Amino acid sequence: MSTDTTPDVRDVVIVGSGVAGLSAAVYTARADLKPLVLEGPEPGGQLTLTTDVENYLGFPEGVGGMELIQNGKEQASRFGAEFAHGTVETASLEEHPFELELATGETLRTRALIVATGASARWVGADGEDDLMGYGLSTCATCDGAFHRGDDVLVIGGGDSAMEEALFLAKFADSVTVVHRRDELRASDIMAQRARDHDAIEFRWNTELLEIQGSQEHGVTGATLVHHPDGHPTDKLESGLAVERETVDVGGIFYGVGHVPNTEFLAETPVELEEDGYLRTEPGMTTETAVEGVFGAGDVMDPDYRQAITAAGTGSMAALDAEAWLDTRGTTRDLQPVVEVKLDD
């Protein structure tokens, strides 16, 4: 097993290696803070599930999601950022330096912490979704909707997220069908009414997605839906009750069943979280949290935009905020050398 050498107390640890974490790594590394980036259980984050990114500044012909992430990692490494496979299980943030306990049982100590752990999109468990995510199956209409001009597409869900996806997709697709497992929406009245009033949006009530057809070569080509008049048809199917099945031809499927911010390791800390689990930052143009020295970046603190470009922006902001905060306290560059320990990759 390869190892990375890390000081006993780091100046900056960045938790998360998506666009936000990589942007923070570039900026803190250029500031000679020698950041350590913990890549987490999903290195690269949600962008690695996107085959083509067309709306990221500076790539007029588009860029692959994985390529963009790999370029960012190489850029950060060139300036001195270190990367390690590691997942934070618990964090002690009551006093400085902070202590992070990893899933391996190892402990990291750091003066500043940048949380860029992102938010994971909920999946519905349909057959074929593992193979087709990023190949016509998506969790982000604003990221991938333009690829579906002239297609018939499905949106899975019944809340505000699903309505937002449907309304955005209606700008490009020939038809948008919202598939919801009940006979009424969970969305706010205004969002539900906007979707109902749109000529290109239809609804399939008491219906769920069972299977996705297609291939990575040709993308999504169809879907199998199940229906039961009392709703929740997949539960009925698992219970042995009869349900109606239908296969439809579609060119794209979008999950609009929400996101879960990856903040579990902060639950027992003084860092404040919103009711839905998102990291709460201080008012104004700052990435500071309720705990001095802890900063947030990317989707973990942004339930609204969830774009690669905004994640990169907040990553740079968190780095600048962390650098300014460290300058008021002194960094390892100003202190005596510390003992070196090994961190498993």
Image (cartoon, rainbow, N blue to C red):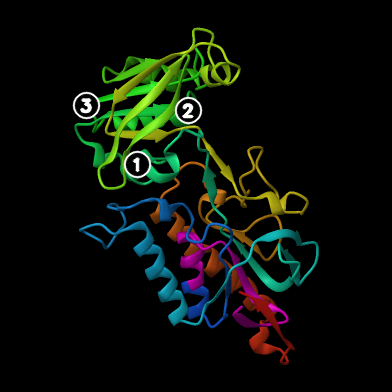
Task: Please rate how many residues cluster around mark 3, counting C-alpha atoms within 10 Å: few if below 14, some from 14 to 19, many from 20.
Answer: some
Q: Nearer the viewer, residue 21 or 179?
A: 179
Residue hosting label 3: 174
* The N terminus, quarter of image: bottom right
Secondary structure under tag 2 reads helix
Amino acid type assigned to the residue bearing label 2 in the image: Asp
Q: Is residue 134 above or below residue 214?
A: below
* Residue shown at the point (80%, 66%) measured from the top left: 95
Whether the residues at callouts 3 and 2 have beta carbons within 8 Å, the answer is no
- Vertical placement of residue 148 versus 5, above or below: above
Measure how far apart labels 3 and 1 are at the Cα level: 16 Å
Kindly report which numbered mark, 3 or 2, lies closer to the viewer in this rendering. Answer: 3
* CB-based contact (under 8 Å), mark 1 and mark 2: no
Q: Which residues are magenta?
A: 1-25
Instruction: Give residue 343's position: percent from left, percent from top.
Output: 67, 77
| Residue 216 position within the rendered picture, expressed as x and y whole percent measured from the top left | 31, 47
The residue identified by callout 2 is 160
